[in-house]
Amino acid sequence: MKVEQISVFLENKPGSLEHATRVLRDANINIRTLSLAETVDFGILRLIVNDVEKANKVLKDSGFQVSKTPVVAVEVPDKPGGLHSIMEVVSKEGINVEYLYAFVEKSGQNAVIIFRFDNPEKAIDILLKHKFTVIPGEKLYEF
């Protein structure tokens, strides 16, 4: 039920993000969702893509430092309190959220939240127990 996310370390300078997106475009890799965090010297581009192995290879071949990280995708109604319903359950169980980002497939329907939990296996078990929709990687890559 986990999803593979690619993390790409980028220099914090003009053109770095363009270069990474060009490499993915040229390899016909579709970005499903992304997050970009930065510091003074570098940024971390986190990506969910339609072909993890190919993206990993072409980015590495182009000189990028790339790693893969297991994350969890959870679908919730796109309405006030959707995120809180998940946070309430995982916090009661002592699960820490290291980071998250989200996207909405169609406005007013469902949001998909990508979580990096400190214990993804336990988080998945608890979320399923509480009837949340955990999206497997294979399905998410096709959205």
Image: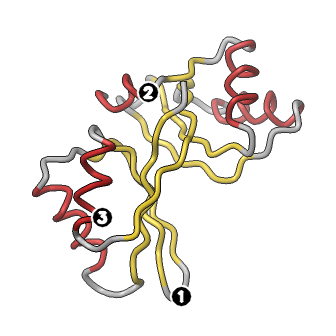
Quadrant, the N terminus: top right
Identity, as a three-letter code, of the amino acid under mark 1: Val
Question: Image point 79% across, 32% down: which residue?
Answer: 90
Return the x and y of residue 40 as percentages of the image width and height.
53, 88
Identity, as a three-letter code, of the amino acid under mark 2: Gly
Q: CA distance from mark 1 to mark 3?
A: 23 Å
Question: Image point 33% across, 43% down: which residue?
Answer: 52
- Residue 60's disc number: 3
Element type at mark 2: loop
Q: Is residue 17 above or below residue 137?
A: below
Q: Earlier in the sequence, mark 2 or mark 3?
A: 3
Q: Which residue is mark 2?
A: 108
Q: CA distance from mark 2 to mark 3?
A: 38 Å
Quadrant, the C terminus: top left
Q: Earlier in the sequence, mark 1 or mark 3?
A: 1
Q: Earlier in the sequence, mark 2 or mark 1?
A: 1
Identity, as a three-letter code, of the amino acid under mark 3: Lys
Q: Nearer the viewer, mark 2 or mark 1?
A: 1
